[in-house]
Image (cartoon, rainbow, N blue to C red):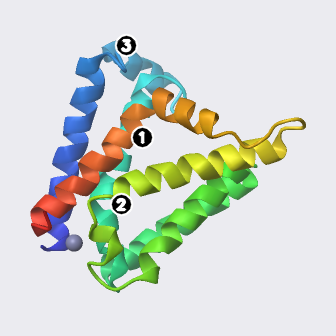
Amino acid sequence: MQFKAHVLGGLLAGAGMVSVAQISGYTSASVSDLQKILERPYQTDGDLPLLSGLFLLTLFMSLFPDLDSASVLQRWFYRIILIILIGLFFTGQTGLFAAVTFVSLLPLLHRHRGWTHSKFTPFILAILFAAILEFNRSANALTGQFSPGNMVDWFYTYWIYVLACVAGHYTHLLMDWQF
Ligand SMILES: [Zn+2]
């Protein structure tokens, strides 16, 4: 399946995830939120930034499987990742820095349509992400220890992000017909 078709699929899946977040009550964004964003464009809390993040994550995951082959998509992906890593590093977000670094290297390790096109991939990525963030938290906490229980809490709180990963990724697999 072509790159453009996957972008279109990702945009639709992203719109779907935004609807799921609103309908399930995870977010309750309204027109007044839009006004707040216009007044303070750089704020990262609130429902609209969360919905934008969900939309982008879904779109990202619908393109992720094809990062395993040299392409225009791959080049742009690593340019954007570099900018994100610079931002995370200089704002001191070492946990996210490490997690994004690990995950973004993974598609390069295997052949085209290898593990990135597996049905288990979005779940493995989500577990890996939670493990890295929890490991980083426990390493930084003075008395903290790595706790799988905290990873479970992470999934409980951020389930909508896991769902966005799966929705985006499965949209890609469906379009490639890898099921
Ligand atoms: Zn593919």
Q: Nearer the viewer, mark 2 or mark 1?
A: 2
Q: Residues within 10 Å of mark 2 (few under 14, many from 20)?
A: some
Q: Residues within 10 Å of mark 3 (few under 14, many from 20)?
A: few
Q: Nearer the viewer, residue 107 or 22?
A: 107
147 over 157 or under it: above or below: below
Question: How far across and down, in percent of the image, does residue 30 sit?
Answer: 32, 15
Q: Residue at x 23, y 19 (%)?
A: 23
176 over 17 or under it: above or below: below
List the single residue furthest toward the right.
142
Mark with earlier residue (1, 3): 3
Residue receiving disc 3: 32
Residue receiving disc 1: 53
Q: How many marks?
A: 3
Judge from the rendering whether residue 2 lies leftward or rightward of residue 100; answer left or right: left
Q: Residue at x 82, y 44 (%)?
A: 140
Image quadrant containing the N terminus: bottom left
Q: Is residue 35 visible?
A: yes
**Disc 2 secondary structure class:** helix
Does the closest atom of ligand 1 sit within 8 Å of the Cβ of label 3?
no
Mark with earlier residue (3, 2): 3
Does the closest atom of ligand 1 sit within 8 Å of the Cβ of label 1?
no
Residue receiving disc 2: 121
C-alpha separation, residue under disc 2 versus residue under disc 1: 20 Å
Q: Residue at x 62, y 61 (%)?
A: 85
Image quadrant assignment for residue 18: top left
